[in-house]
């Protein structure tokens, strides 16, 4: 399935689930509208001496009846008071919105982020400076950006002016070059009087989240035959059939049940014919995605290999769902805002692939249980004859022992090793494909050294 068409289906499904459009905005009302203000700060470019000077000049002019001195002092007082009052009112009834054209996107896509400023009062805003924090892993197609002290964030700085009851919109293009959950905000605004004597700062939290889905490619590009994408599906134990759902009729062979002989077709053709029925249960496919890229957690994360592993898992899930399988997912990683490992039961609902992509998008590559423990704990809960696909960058002897036990229990097993670095490739060379095939495990290897995020075709 084409990623863009799949994206449209995902967006539609999310809209049904949330009951609203996917394009969202975060709005903050500054200094007005009954909402709480955050981190309000007013500063002055004048020292206190100017206030005493203005008052002193006015008093001297009045005392000595000097019109020029009195007028000068009064002008200073009026300018200072007007500037102070202007700065107090400049951010009142000012609405600031950050709008994202999409809150879900795929890697490589561009979305639009816009800032909408509305001055809902008769007092103009001569200058307005805006700083908005956006995720550092995303790329902003604009020169008006700078790196902040925080390495995970960047700051978008812009300046403008607003007349009375005026609305201004600034648009930017964000390139989704990194998978994951990306948080935006807060927005810091500063303004003041026309003379620049007083400044007022306000910081308003405008939390927004953009989820970038992992890449997935057609299974043909992965080098797996389209008709048997996960090896031989002939399990040791056959699935039960539904006698009310006739699929086809063929010649009788030794081993067929005599109860399924089609006597009318036998009479017409002169040879024994038997009935074939649809399976009573939809075949299940369970994907185990191993986020570990090193045997020891403290060794770090091989980011390229992790991305390749996630891409392969997403591609297998997409293809299996299109082929009519009930697809489930298990990842040795904690879910978002949860202390439990990611586990999606097999299903074929319209939003199953969306659910799988969202969980794969949030994988960080750390803080999870070993995949061997995950497979061992799920061993007794697997359905009879369920097909298992293990996508992993590292294959240990313990993992192979568990997979062999599952194969003897009647589960078709497909093992897919991934490597996007030379270290991972050397690790994969330790495996013997001939030995795995002889033990009934279908084995593939995906290698894309240095090109995990730009891969367009992978071969095993």
Image (cartoon, helix red, strand yellow):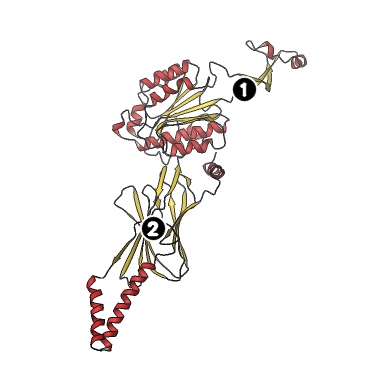
Q: Residue furthest front?
A: 63
Query: Is residue 274 positioned above or below 162 on the image?
Result: above
Residue 440 in picture, x, y percent from top left: 47, 18
Q: Is residue 107 visible?
A: no
Residue sitting at x 43%, y 17%? 404
Instruction: Tally the marks.
Output: 2
Residue sitting at x 33%, y 47%? 152
Q: Quadrant of residue 71?
A: bottom left
Image quarter in which the N terminus is found: top right
Residue sitting at x 49%, y 22%? 382
Local crowd size for mark 1, using a 10 Å CA cut-off: few (<14), some (14–19), many (≥20): few
User: Alpha carbon of mark 2 to alpha carbon of mark 1: how far?
Assistant: 61 Å
Local crowd size for mark 2, using a 10 Å CA cut-off: few (<14), some (14–19), many (≥20): some
Residue underneath mark 1: 280
Q: Is residue 323 left or right of residue 390?
A: right
Residue 231 in picture, x, y percent from top left: 51, 24
Disc 1, SS: loop
Disc 2, SS: loop
Which label sits on residue 348? Answer: none
Q: Is residue 59 left or right of residue 230?
A: left
Residue 341 in picture, x, y percent from top left: 41, 31
Query: Is residue 116 positioned above or below 296 on the image?
Result: below
Q: Is residue 33 left or right of residue 85?
A: right
Disc 2 or 1, which lies upstream in sequence? 2
Query: Is residue 400 positioned above or below 46 on the image?
Result: above
Give whichever of 207, 146 is nearer the camera. 207
Image quarter in which the C terminus is found: top left
Residue underneath mark 2: 37
């Amino acid at each position: 399935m084409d990623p863009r068409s799949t994206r449209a289906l995902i967006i539609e499904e999310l809209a049904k689930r949330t009951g609203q459009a996917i394009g969202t905005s975060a709005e903050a009302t500054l200094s007005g509208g009954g909402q709480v203000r955050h981190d309000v700060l007013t500063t002055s470019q004048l020292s206190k001496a100017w206030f005493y000077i203005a008052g002193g000049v006015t008093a001297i002019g009045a005392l000595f009846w000097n019109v020029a001195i009195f007028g000068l002092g009064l002008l200073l007082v009026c300018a200072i008071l007007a500037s102070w009052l202007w700065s107090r009112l400049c951010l009142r009834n000012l609405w600031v919105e950050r709008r994202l054209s999409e809150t879900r996107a795929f890697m490589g896509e561009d979305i639009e982020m816009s800032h909408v400023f509305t001055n809902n009062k008769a007092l103009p805003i001569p200058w307005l400076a805006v700083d908005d924090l956006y995720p550092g892993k995303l790329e902003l197609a604009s020169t008006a950006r700078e790196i902040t002290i925080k390495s995970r964030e960047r700051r978008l700085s812009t300046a403008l002016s607003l007349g009375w009851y005026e609305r201004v919109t600034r648009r930017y293009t964000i390139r989704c070059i990194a998978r994951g959950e990306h948080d935006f905000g807060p927005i810091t605004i500063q303004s003041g009087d026309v003379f620049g004597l007083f400044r007022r700062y306000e910081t308003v939290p405008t939390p927004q989240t953009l989820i970038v889905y992992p890449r997935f490619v057609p299974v043909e590009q992965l080098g797996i035959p389209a008709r048997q994408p996960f090896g031989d599906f002939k399990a040791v134990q056959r699935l039960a059939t539904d006698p009310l759902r006739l699929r086809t009729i063929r010649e009788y062979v030794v081993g067929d049940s005599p109860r399924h002989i089609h006597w009318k077709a036998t009479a017409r053709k002169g040879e024994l014919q038997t009935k074939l029925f649809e399976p009573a249960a939809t075949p299940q496919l369970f994907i185990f995605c191993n986020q570990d890229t090193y045997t020891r957690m403290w060794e770090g994360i091989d980011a390229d290999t992790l991305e390749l592993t996630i891409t392969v898992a997403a591609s297998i899930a997409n293809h299996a769902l299109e082929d009519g399988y009930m697809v489930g997912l298990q990842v040795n990683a904690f879910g978002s805002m949860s202390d439990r490992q990611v586990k999606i039961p097999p299903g074929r609902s319209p939003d199953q692939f969306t659910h799988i992509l969202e969980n794969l998008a949030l994988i960080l590559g750390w803080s999870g249980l070993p995949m061997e423990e995950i497979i061992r704990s799920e061993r007794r809960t697997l359905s009879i004859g369920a097909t298992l696909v293990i996508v992993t960058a590292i294959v240990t002897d313990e993992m192979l022992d568990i997979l062999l036990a599952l194969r003897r229990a009647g589960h078709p097993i497909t093992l897919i090793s991934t490597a996007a670095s030379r270290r991972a490739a050397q690790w994969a060379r330790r495996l013997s494909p001939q030995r795995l095939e002889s033990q009934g495990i279908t084995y593939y290897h995906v290698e894309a050294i240095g090109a995990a995020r730009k891969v367009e075709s992978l071969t095993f």
